[in-house]
Image (tube, grey):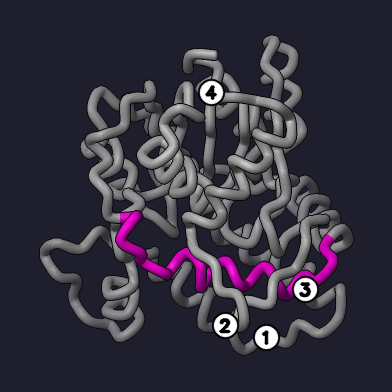
Amino acid sequence: MLLVMGTATPGLGWPDELVDTLVTAGRQVIRYDHRDTGRSGRVDFAAHPYSVADLAGDAVAVLDGYGVAAAHVAGASLGGTIGQWLAVHRPERVTALTAIMTSPMGADAGPAWARAMAGQEPDPGDLPPPSSRFLAHLARSAAAPRTTREEHVAANLETWRVLNGEALPFDEEAARRFVEESYDVAADPAAALNHDAAGRLMTEDRRAPLASIKAPTLVVHGSEDPLLPLPHGEALAAAIPHARLEVVPGMGHSFLSPGLPRHIAELLLTQPS
């Protein structure tokens, strides 16, 4: 199983409990750091901008590095977009696809976000924008200083608190450990912000029909996702033939609630190995 994390998040975003549950069940698991995160290299994005296709190429390179011809690809958030790209454009490398808390890879959320930030009504064809609580958090976060380790940790911890949503308890101890470890292993913590630009780049390859996906597909989405509300997951499942949608009650846009990592792992184990 290849676990692909989301925007600006290293492989540590897949909790140890989730990975241990998979390994105990007999799965061989790879989690890795995207470029510009964790121990991976930093890219001069201004000189060498990259796209989802490039991030998908990194995932293929990881499989090649381990001599793995094909894998169950499980992606969270931006990682789910990368998984879709692989299932469409490199289907021979994907034995099964699990897309968690993500949206159809060809859905351009930018206009809906802009309308929401401006207080305008959504267009009829828009997938819903983030929650008002999350948008308010973004506005506050943009003005907060992040010059010291403590400021970075505090700001990132608050972001994960908001992403967790308000329905399930927030595991602050696990979140703080994850945020601190992610900061400490990163060669350049600020470089991860390049993922925002990469994710917004809507290239033509992302508009390829998801109906071509042949791999058994599981879509997992939280009922209380504040970043990508449930209709995003529903739209994704509807676009992929025979996809199965599992809605996790109360889950937001993270794995940082007690018991949630094990539950997600158990859902992953229902997919073909």
| Kind of element beneath mark 3 | helix
Q: Amino acid at mark 4?
A: Leu
Classify residue 220 as left or right of residue 205: right
Q: Earlier in the sequence, mark 3 or mark 4?
A: 3
**Residue shown at 32%/25% (left/top)?**
214
Residue 93 position in % (x across, y down): 50, 29
Density class for disc 4 (Cα within 10 Å; few <14, some 14-19, many ≥20) is many
Q: Amino acid at mark 2?
A: Arg
- Disc 3 designates what residue? 152
- Disc 1 designates what residue? 144
Residue 71 position in % (x across, y down): 56, 25
Is 129 situated above or below 246? below
Does the magenta portion include 188? yes
- In whole angstroms, how far apart are the C-alphas of marks 3 and 1? 10 Å
Density class for disc 2 (Cα within 10 Å; few <14, some 14-19, many ≥20) is few
Contact between marks 3 and 2 (CB within 8 A): the answer is: no
- Disc 2 designates what residue? 140
| Kind of element beneath mark 4 | helix
**Residue shown at 22%/35% (left/top)?**
211
Which SS type dominates the magenta stretch?
helix
Residue 44 position in % (x across, y down): 68, 77
Density class for disc 1 (Cα within 10 Å; few <14, some 14-19, many ≥20) is few
